Amino acid sequence: MTERLEATERKQADWRTDPTRSRAGGCIGGIGTHAFNLDTFVSGLKLKALLADLTTFVPGRSLDNSVHVLLRYKGGARGMLRASQIAPGDNNALRLRIYGERGGLIWS
């Protein structure tokens, strides 16, 4: 997704970059929601607030293709979510890290 593949009539890129077909969520809707659901399922934490930076790096696109989100959970825990459609060589590289007072969990 680092190039305007939708201009070459590639069907996958075409619907993913068209807000009338995929709606407002670009990368955050296509990737970020899955990562967030996994995070809250594994940790058991409930979200209190978030701050999201949605960026479009590819000229001519209207939907985000890079996302950074700061998360605040009920009870005081903090988190961070990063999702990208423009990280060549890092395809489907899902990583989850959760740290607590007595230990941590890292999963790739």
Image (tube, grey):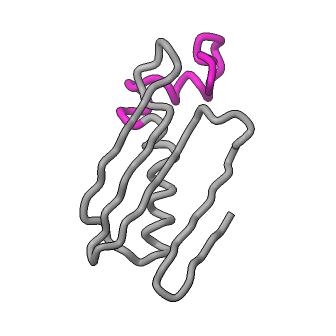
Quadrant (top left/top right/bottom left/bottom right) for the N terminus: top right
Q: How many marks?
A: 0
Question: Can you tell which quarter of the image residue 53 is in?
Answer: top left
Q: Is 76 or 25 nearer to us in this picture?
A: 76
x and y percentages locating residue 26 in the rendered image: 45, 34
Where residue 70 appears, as percent x and y from the top left, is 37, 53
Position of 95 with respect to 23 (left or right) is: right
User: Is 99 colored magenta in this rendering?
Assistant: no
74 relative to 1, above or below:
below
Residue 95 falls in image quadrant: bottom right
The residue at the point 44 percent across, 52 percent down is 33
Residue range of the region highlighted in magenta in the rendering: 1-25
Query: Whole-percent x and y of residue 52?
Result: 34, 44
Above or below, comparing residue 30 to residue 77 in the picture: above
Which residue is pictured at 43% across the width and 69% down the height? 40
Taking the view exactly as shown, the residue that stands out farthest to the bottom is: 102
Q: Is residue 15 magenta?
A: yes
Residue 72 in which image quadrant = bottom left
Residue 41: x, y in percent? 46, 72
Residue found 52% across the figure and 26% down from its top: 15
- Is 56 left or right of 24, judged from the image as shown? right
Q: Residue furthest front?
A: 101
Q: Residue at x 35, y 33 (%)?
A: 24
Which quadrant: the C terminus?
bottom right
Q: Is residue 58 above or below residue 97?
A: above
